[in-house]
Amino acid sequence: MANRFRSGISFFKTIAVTDSVSSVRSKSLFPALRTYATASAQTTANVKFTKDPSVPRGTRLAAIRDACDQAKFAEPTKNFLSLLAENGKLKNLDAIVKKFMQLTNAHRGDVKVLVTTVIPLPPAEEKELTETLQEIIGAGKKITVEQKIDPSIYGGLIVEFQQKVLDMSIRTRAQQMERLLREPVDFNNL
């Protein structure tokens, strides 16, 4: 049973990435899902409704279809939300949308780079960093830089992209220096 479930997930990922990314429908499907997820997260009654297992499937399905009709969602969006409602998976909609957007961006060649600094980077430095990262990542990929401010790194920066971390922070350099100074010195090997 578990293997069938895993193969179903990989089948869904394959279909979602190859078909939906390139189709016109994906342009309306996932923005609509993101809109629905954001709106439903802000309504406490809807949050309780989607997470409450005691709500019968039929009631949940009818409510979702009504909400989709009122929002004038396209048919693929209605079908997808209905499928989630039938299977009691509406509570996972945020994670589904986030994961699909990651897969879509990876398929398109978009790379999200998270840069952590003590103060915001000036535009000239951000441009220089983007150009350097473009050389590292390669041509043909679009780089989106997101800045994060963290005073605990003391200075320097930390760059995270494609499961890689380039830590050039003063905090890390100080920790490395401290570790080196704490190691015992063997005068016989000098």
Image (cartoon, rainbow, N blue to C red):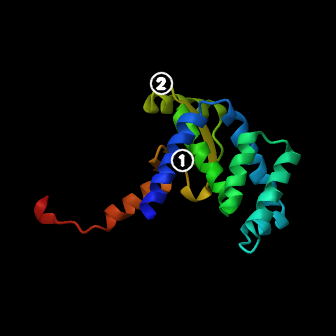
Residue 153: x, y in percent?
Answer: 54, 56
> Residue at the spot x=47%, y=43% of the render?
162
**Disc 2 secondary structure class:** loop
Residue for badge 2:
139
Residue 28: x, y in percent?
Answer: 73, 36
With 49 as the anchor, is 3 left or right in this view? left
From this viewpoint, is residue 76 visible? yes
Q: What residue type is labelled 1?
A: Phe
- Dot 1 surroundings within 10 Å: few (below 14), some, or many (20 or more)? few
**Disc 1 secondary structure class:** helix
Residue 142: x, y in percent?
Answer: 56, 30
Q: Which mark is residue 187?
A: none
Of the numbered discs 2 and 1, the one sitting upstream in the chain is 1
- Dot 2 surroundings within 10 Å: few (below 14), some, or many (20 or more)? few
Is residue 152 placed above or below 119 in the rendered structure?
Answer: below
> Residue at the spot x=74%, y=75% of the render?
54
Is residue 184 placed above or below 12 in the rendered structure?
Answer: below
Residue 93: x, y in percent?
Answer: 67, 55
With 49 as the anchor, is 15 left or right in this view? left
Going by the picture, which residue comes out furthest to the right? 70
Q: What residue type is labelled 2?
A: Ala
Between 94 and 160, the residue placed more toward the observer is: 94
| Measured Cα–Cα span from mark 2 to mark 1 | 30 Å
Q: Residue 12 carries which label?
A: 1
> Residue at the spot x=67%, y=64% of the render?
88
> In terms of image quadrants, where is residue 121?
top right
Q: Nearer the viewer, mark 2 or mark 1?
A: 1
Q: How many marks?
A: 2
From this viewpoint, is residue 112 visible? no
Between 48 and 59, the residue placed more toward the observer is: 59
Between 149 and 156, the residue placed more toward the observer is: 149
> Residue at the spot x=63%, y=49% of the render?
98
